[in-house]
Image (spheres, helix red, strand yellow):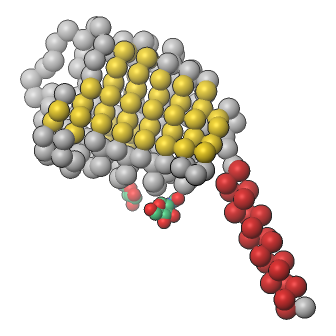
């Protein structure tokens, strides 16, 4: 009887683990070998599993990236959002307090015209921030990133409407070298 219970316990555990691994938000594909989730056409930020490490969102129609949108993902390291045609601005704390995030890329978001100066905040592990091909009209304030990484790379290109880079734009991004 005892061994039957052990077998049952084993089966229940196995089913739970595989259910966890099979969880994938609607409209997304998940590769749990590398904890990567790719989504197409999302209108709101999908409900990602807490073990997710990479998020790829393509062809989104987001109205916003809410405060602390990714903060339930303790191990998130890469966030890519591309080809959105509705996102107008990044709110305060959209990307906030993500201790393991190393790469964030936003590209092909023609409607994006404003980034709150605290949208990127407390990202100590950030190595790469790319903001390309957007409708930004002014250089985003990035002084709250506070990256401690050597060789932080900032790529802000093809934002046709940016005419001026204000003084002190680069203060506070990283304690170390900044590569552009
Ligand atoms: C985050 O990664 C660590 C190992 O690097 C692991 O022990 C932990 O369970 C992970 N957290 C989540 C929520 O998956
Ligand atoms: C930042 O995240 C850590 C966990 O990684 C949490 O303990 C802390 O409360 C968070 N701080 C804020 C200001 O949200």
Q: Is residue 49 left or right of residue 68?
A: right
Farthest front residue? Answer: 33
Tell me how many marks there are.
0
Looking at the image, which is closer to me, 112 or 132?
A: 132
Farthest right residue? Answer: 1
Looking at the image, which is closer to me, 96 or 12?
A: 12
Q: Is residue 73 above or below residue 157?
A: below
Residue 160 in view of the camera:
yes
Q: In the image, residue 110 lies at what x, y percent?
A: 42, 12
Residue depicted at 53% across the width and 49% down the height: 34
Q: Quadrant of the N terminus?
A: bottom right
Q: Is residue 158 above or below residue 33?
A: above
Residue depicted at 72% across the width and 59% down the height: 18
Farthest bottom residue? Answer: 2
Q: Is residue 48 above or below residue 130?
A: below
Q: In the image, residue 21 lies at what x, y percent?
A: 67, 54
Q: Quadrant of the C terminus?
A: top left
Q: In the image, residue 10 lies at what x, y percent?
A: 77, 76
Residue 4 occupies which quadrant of the picture?
A: bottom right
Q: In the image, residue 151 lies at what x, y percent?
A: 18, 41
Q: Is residue 32 left or right of residue 90?
A: right
Residue depicted at 25% across the width and 16% down the height: 138
Ligand 2 found in image quarter: bottom left
Residue depicted at 68% across the width and 56% down the height: 20
Residue 147 occupies which quadrant of the picture?
A: top left
Residue 93 in view of the camera:
no
Farthest left residue? Answer: 167
């Amino acid at each position: 009887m005892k061994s039957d219970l052990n077998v049952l316990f084993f089966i229940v555990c196995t089913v739970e683990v595989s259910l966890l691994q099979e969880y994938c938000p609607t409209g997304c594909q998940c590769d749990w070998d590398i904890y990567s989730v790719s989504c197409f056409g999302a209108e709101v930020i999908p409900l990602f599993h807490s073990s997710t490490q990479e998020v790829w969102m393509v062809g989104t129609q987001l109205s916003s990236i809410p405060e602390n949108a990714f903060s339930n993902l303790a191990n998130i390291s890469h966030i890519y959002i591309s080809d959105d045609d509705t996102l107008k601005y990044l709110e305060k704390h959209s990307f906030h307090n993500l201790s393991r995030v190393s790469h964030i890329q936003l590209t092909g978001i023609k409607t994006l015209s404003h980034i709150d100066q605290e949208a990127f905040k407390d990202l100590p592990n950030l190595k790469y921030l790319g903001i390309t091909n957007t409708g930004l009209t002014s250089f985003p304030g990035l002084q709250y990133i506070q990256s401690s990484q050597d060789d932080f790379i900032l790529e802000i290109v093809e934002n046709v409407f940016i005419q001026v880079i204000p003084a002190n734009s680069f203060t506070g991004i990283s304690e170390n070298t900044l590569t552009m």
